Amino acid sequence: MKSKTSRKSTFFIILILILALAYSAFFGIENYYGDTRIVYAKGANDIRWGIDINGGVEAVFAPADTKLEVTDEDINAAKNLIETRLVNKKITDYEIYADTTNNRVVVRFPSNNQEEGFDANEAVSELSASAMVIFRKGTSETGEIILQGSEDVKSATAGLDPKNNDPIVILNFTSSGKQKFTAATAEAVNSATSSKYKDSTTGSTESFISIWLSTTTYDENGKEVTTQTNISSATVDEVISSDECVISNKQQPMTLEETTDIAEKINGGKLPFSLAVKNLQIISPTLGADALNVMVIAGIIAFAVVCLIMIVRYRVNGVVAAIALLGQLAGSIACISGFFSGSDSFTLTIPGIAGIILSIGVGVDCNVIAAERIRDEFKKGKPLDAAINSGFKNSLSAIIDGNVTIVIVAIVLMGAFGSPDSFLGKIFSPVMSIFGTSITGTIYSFGYTLLIGVIFNLIMGVLASKYMLRSISQFKFMRNPAFYGGKKNG
């Protein structure tokens, strides 16, 4: 009796989970403390829209030193690094072109519709910036340098402190960096009276080692602009001989977005030459917000009509399919919007929306196959429970084959048109380079939305649908085979 009750409750548990996911994915979860907006889960309004919908920025990069001898390989290397930085920032609707004739790189990318007072100049500067992490004695930016750059720092990773769950940056030292850091901490511990390690502002008697991020950009005249940002200042109480160091800020904890940005800048690689922004202009959207509103309304109507047809045609199976499709759509939106406050929104474009629509079509097909297989089992004379179990079992191979094929296509698209530094990008770049690069980000966006849509289809259309249908069929008033495509009892 308990087992039967448990199976009946499964339908309502899955239904509540899907409705909760749908509400939070579409509308987000947030709160306000005065004028401060606290985001717990991002919604559809937090999606970053592509150039075709929201407009964007066009920038022309060229060597800061006009007398520098630059090869075609140098220009292409600069293009590849900028492209990698765009993808790292979840900006996928970009266009990038290496003009080797005029020694320049032309980039177009969408503006951030979620950032108030979006600064195009700052956004462009981040793409061409070079950054270096520096450890100094004491807390001043003029303090003696202990170690710095790629010579001493192997890699940087954003993570969470296991003690308090605060975002941190984890640095891994090279062998030389480890030796320098060990020697510096030993000197700090043994030199209690040395002013080199003291806080010159407060006059603290404790020994400090500060960590700085030195960022260099170039203006349109090729003038170097260097900014020193203090990331952390830590007291030294003991000798540290590890090849790993954690960057944190106890006074003002960093956000996960900030630590990710720092890690990306440190790992971002070095440009083959310094780049200056030679031209910057704002691009108007080709479609605009009105077209987006029309697409949203059309999508809602189409989704409702499809669900209605499924319900009329397949009855209870159709109701379950409609719920599963809602879960699939909500899951896709959650992955695109960045859902959780610590992650960035994926840039959604018109081709990206097409990927969502196509994945919904695949989800409808998945549920239709299962419903038809259940009908076939009724025709063989099987009872309700056996028909449902056999129907899902017999439909599984066809569903898996179709979905896996689309997953492979989506991965190939993301590899061929994604970041050139990715594993798949390196495989496909020799072939795809002959087609140019202006469509790279657009196709990548399509592949991404198609991939996540199909993954959620497998979760919702196969697993959730199966358990919901099994559960609801256990209620006495729902035991009539006619509700599931069979003949009416009696």
Image: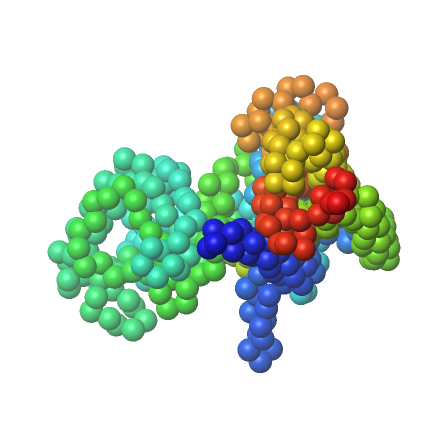
Viewer-proximal residue, 272 or 442?
442
Q: Is residue 401 above or below residue 48?
A: above
Q: Quadrant of residue 314?
A: top right
Residue at the image point whose x is 49% and y is 45% from the top: 264
**In this picture, is 64 found above or below 427?**
below
Spot occupied by residue 186 in the image (x, y as percentages of width and height)? 17, 51
Q: Which residue of the protein is positioned furthest toward the front in this rendering? A: 490
- In the image, residue 27 lies at what x, y percent? 67, 63
> Above or below — where is 68 with respect to 157?
above
Residue at the far bottom in the pictured view:
34
**Residue 64 in sight:** no
Instruction: Determine whether, in the image, residue 367 is placed left or right of residue 289.
Output: left
Q: Residue at x 28, y 37 (%)?
A: 176
Q: Residue at x 63, y 22 (%)?
A: 428
Residue at the limit of the structure toward the left, as seen here: 190
> Going by the image, does 165 lie left or right of 380?
left
Residue at horizontal 65 percent and vertical 38 percent from the top: 383
Color theme of the render: rainbow
Residue 417: which quarter of the image?
Answer: top right
Residue 37 in the image, given as x and y percentages of width and height: 59, 71
Within the image, what quadrant is residue 273 found in? top right
- Report the quarter where the C terminus lies: top right
Looking at the image, residue 263 sits to the left or right of residue 362; the answer is left
Q: Nearer the viewer, residue 68 or 98?
A: 98
How many numbered badges does the structure rendering display?
0
Does residue 33 appear in the picture of this structure?
yes
Q: Nearer the viewer, residue 467 or 227?
A: 467
Residue 330: x, y in percent? Answer: 66, 52
In the depicted view, which residue is nearer to us: 466 or 257?
Answer: 466
